């Protein structure tokens, strides 16, 4: 009989604790979106907040409310309401294209047919001083966040989180376009 009790003590304890804390655990599960990727745990929400703070510090401007949204931006926001993860992936592509245009406008020709083209772009932006350090960090952080979303099996982001990512990517893309146009 004591052997049976020893076997049942932990499962029963866990069930009792879960029952007692069920409301608190439910709230915690609703507000937490954790991602486990290669032994690194990252909270999408916390990452976005850090990138937003960095963007504020370097004055990566939010487009004025009077500015008309471009069709690609409208499409991204609509996509975020249907598939937030897909919207993040597509938003990153617009940043990548803007970065490639900046690199090209500065006279650099790169072979993007490599295993890690995003890293190549980032390294070129840094090495050639096409972006200052903190802007490169924002580029890198958005890139890494996109990579974690893409490579984490079954991980999704909320519509709100996706729209925050879109806001930041639009701001960075606009900044990259400004830098490209200054050379024309």
Image (cartoon, rainbow, N blue to C red):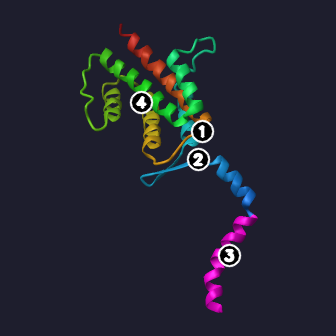
Residue 60 visible somewhere in the drawing: no
Query: Which residue is located at x 50 percent, y 19 percent?
Result: 72
Q: Secondary structure at mark 2?
A: loop
- Determine crowd level at label 4: few under 14, some 14-19, many 20+ residues with C-alpha closer than 10 A: some
| Mark 3 crowd level (few <14, some 14–19, many ≥20, 10 Å Cα) | few
Residue 64 percent coordinates (x, y) = 60, 15
Q: Is residue 35 above or below residue 98?
A: below
- Disc 4, SS: helix
Q: Is residue 61 magenta?
A: no
- Per the image, the residue denoted by label 3 is 12
**Residue at image coords 57%, 25%:** 77
**Which residue bears the numbered disc 1?**
158
Residue count near mark 2 (Cα–Cα under 10 Å), binned few <14, some 14–19, many ≥20: some
Q: What x and y, as percent, mark residue 86?
A: 49, 34
Task: Say above or below: 40 vs 86.
Answer: below
Q: Earlier in the sequence, mark 3 or mark 2?
A: 3
Q: As drawn, is 50 to the left or to the right of 147?
A: right
- Where residue 80 sits: x, y (%)? 56, 30
């Amino acid at each position: 009989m004591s052997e049976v009790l020893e076997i049942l003590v932990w499962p029963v304890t866990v069930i009792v604790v879960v029952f007692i804390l069920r409301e608190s655990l439910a709230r915690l599960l609703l507000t937490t979106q954790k991602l486990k990727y290669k032994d690194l745990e990252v909270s999408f929400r916390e990452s976005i907040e850090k990138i937003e703070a960095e963007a504020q510090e370097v004055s990566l401007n939010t487009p004025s409310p009077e500015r008309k949204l471009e069709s690609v931006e409208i499409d991204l926001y609509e996509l975020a309401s249907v598939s937030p993860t897909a919207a993040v992936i597509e938003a990153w592509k617009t940043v990548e294209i803007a970065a490639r245009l900046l690199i090209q406008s500065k006279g650099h020709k790169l072979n993007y047919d490599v295993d890690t083209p995003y890293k190549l772009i980032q390294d070129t932006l840094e090495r050639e001083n096409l972006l200052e350090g903190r802007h490169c960090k924002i580029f890198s952080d958005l890139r890494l966040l996109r990579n974690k979303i893409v490579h984490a099996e079954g991980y999704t982001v909320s519509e709100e989180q996706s729209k925050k990512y879109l806001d930041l990517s639009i701001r960075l893309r606009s900044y990259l376009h400004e830098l490209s146009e200054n050379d024309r």
